[in-house]
Image (tube, rainbow, N blue to C red):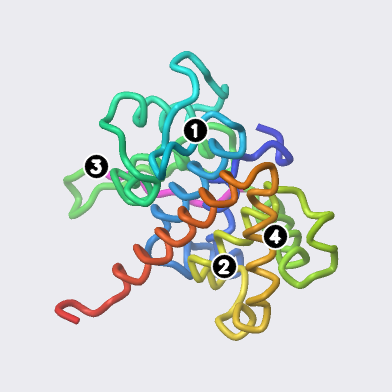
Amino acid sequence: MPNGSLSLPARLYLLAWDTARMRITGTAHLHHLVRAGALTELAQRGLLLDDDGIATPVDLDARTGDAVLDGLLDLVRESLPRRWRTWVTLRARHTLVAVREQLAAEGYLRAEKRRVLGVFPSVEYALERVAVVDALREEAREVLGGSLPVAAVSEREAAVVALAAAAGLRTLASGRDRRRHRERIEELTERSGAAAPALRRVVREVRTAMTAAAAAASAPAGG
């Protein structure tokens, strides 16, 4: 998996790594962000279409060649029809686990076997390609900061920044920076679905659903 061909969910997962502390940080709902990235990429590729708010596979035999994306496609095909907002959260951790395993197989992460309490087997992941993550973050910050006109930003890069900002990913930008660039983020959201009006609606719905899920996950118990 060359760096330039990293999928949206893979990019968003890597962006959550703090390379100074060498750990995932900045979000408690990474599984929602990664799933939102996978849904957006499938929509951008035209493999999931919008049917009155329902995420609908365009072809029962279509494949992407990416194990994570194809796994989600299969899940959508095999399930009852559901709205985009439902797919942002439904079994979202399955997509996160698949992304981690994919990145470990490609050498971006290192899987380390542990035993919890000295008995129960567990796997933890360590970042291997720090320079790649630093480069991805710098590219995303340049997109957010406005060094390029929005029209010159690719739909994929626009989606990375729009989704990461909506998730409040602090490894990309602080809350103050996100507020300062609010208008730019809205423009990047529109750019993420530039191919068609229906795609713009999908990107907005996925982003809104992810933001709502993140807010619910962050709310105090009983609040």
Instruction: Identify residue type, mark 2.
Output: Ala
In the rendered structure, are the residues bearing label 2 and label 1 in contact, judged by CB atoms less than 8 Å apart? no
Residue furthest to the top = 61
Q: Nearer the viewer, mark 4 or mark 2?
A: 2
Instruction: Identify residue type, mark 4.
Output: Asp
Which residue carries the number 3 mark? 121
Which of 162 and 183 lies nearest the eye of the viewer?
A: 183
Instruction: Identify residue type, mark 1.
Output: Leu
Where residue 4 appears, as percent x and y from the top left, is: 73, 40
What whole-number distance in Å separates the C-alpha atoms at marks 2 and 3? Answer: 35 Å
Which residue carries the number 1 mark? 48
In the rendered structure, are the residues bearing label 4 and label 3 in contact, judged by CB atoms less than 8 Å apart? no
User: Quick one: quadrant of the N terminus?
Assistant: top right
What whole-number distance in Å separates the C-alpha atoms at marks 3 and 1? Answer: 37 Å
Q: Give the range drawn in magenta.
A: 121-128
> Could you tell me what secondary structure mostly forms the magenta stretch?
strand
Who comes first in sequence, dot 2 or dot 1?
1
In the rendered structure, are the residues bearing label 2 and label 3 in contact, judged by CB atoms less than 8 Å apart? no
Which residue carries the number 2 mark? 165
Q: Nearer the viewer, mark 4 or mark 3?
A: 4
What whole-number distance in Å separates the C-alpha atoms at marks 2 and 1? Answer: 23 Å
